[in-house]
Image (spheres, grey):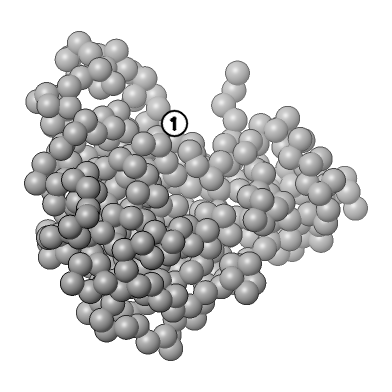
Amino acid sequence: MARVYNFSAGPSMLPEPVLRKAAEEMLDYKGSGQSVMEMSHRSKVFDAIIVEAEALLRKVMNIPENYHVLFLQGGASSQFAMVPLNLMTTKKKCDIVNTGQWSKKAISEAKRYGTVRVVATSEDRNFNYIPDLSKVTFDPDAAYVHITSNNTIFGTRYRTFPDTGAIPLVADASSNILSEVIDVSKFGLIYAGAQKNIAPSGLTIVIIRKDLVGEAQEITPTMFKYTTHVEAKSLYNTPPCYCVYIAKLVFEWLLDRGGLPAMQKINEEKAAMLYDFLDGSKLFKPTVAEPHRSLMNVPFVLPNEELDAEFLKKAVAAGFVNLKGHRSVGGMRASIYNAMPVEGVKKLVEFMKTFETEHR
């Protein structure tokens, strides 16, 4: 069976060269006589894998030396609690920008451990834009400011990040990490679930400025303390070893392609191709207007649910899967993460053009 074009919002497709490399090494990783799935996380072989993975990620993202890189479990959802537990210590309050479902979850968890001020929201238009933060005054006594840098469900993204001054800026970058160049030094903490642009589900990346790692709130469980994982070099307990290994292969793949500057250019090309068609279509309509459109997640709608169902059915038959939109938006959503080739987007647009011609 030929491989399909998988437009899932996550878990998403992985680069084919990475999958082929993993298949080659499945039974015998570099002469160890075992799969990475089987080896001890305390072994010298796996230690070399996780050390190299960190070094490669630092190179890919140009992460400064004054930041720790952690490979954790629990998904980005665990970070909704870990961030306030570790950062809202002397200052028991934070500012959060509400741009959708994941921001709402971050707000809900942070409220358990301190006072949350929602400084801006786009809920008035079902989160189809990023609020203007140029005139927002952040609380100087806030422990941190939290944003969701890309919204998987609603298809919005920050093109510029807010200037929070001395207040640490925290970003949930789960759905756009590694998709474009960012200045890590502008953030106090970046976290991301791996299942969109990095690796299979089960791994969470945390990049945290060293001065923000210290005494967590007294009630913080051991596994939820950043110090626990910093001191143990992400090996306090058994990590998701195979996910770390796949992440290492993805980082290598990115560097082979020219790193994030080259990847950003490709992603901009793919997104422009799809948005250009949607903007000119009389049948399909994008749900997000410029300048807030995501490079990774492109939601669009048809005039009615009957056409949605027909389109999705025909799309699957043509080899385009997981295009159904989230119930909050409806319609369709094409997630075009790093591993989606340009060819996949071209073929999707051709399919959509044919569908539109048939329904004039």
> In screen coordinates, is 296 left or right of 321?
left
Q: Nearer the viewer, residue 179 or 147?
A: 147
Report which quarter residue 71 is drawn in. Answer: top left
Mark 1 falls on what kind of element? helix
Residue drawn where x is 44% and y is 61% of the image: 108
> In screen coordinates, is 116 left or right of 271?
left
Question: Where residue 322 sits: x, y (%)?
Answer: 62, 39
Question: Where residue 277 sits: x, y (%)?
Answer: 69, 58
The residue that disc 1 covers is 16
Residue drawn where x is 34% and y is 25% of the image: 21
Report which quarter residue 242 is drawn in. Answer: top left
The amino acid sitting under disc 1 is Glu
Q: Nearer the viewer, residue 291 or 243?
A: 243
> In screen coordinates, is 257 left or right of 338?
left
**Residue found at the far front of this picture:** 219
Residue 151 visible in the displayed image: no
Residue 66 visible in the displayed image: yes
Which quarter shows the N terminus? top right
**Residue found at the far right of this picture:** 360
**Within-10-Å neighbours for mark 1: few <14, some 14–19, many 20+:** some
In the image, is residue 308 above or below residue 85? Answer: above
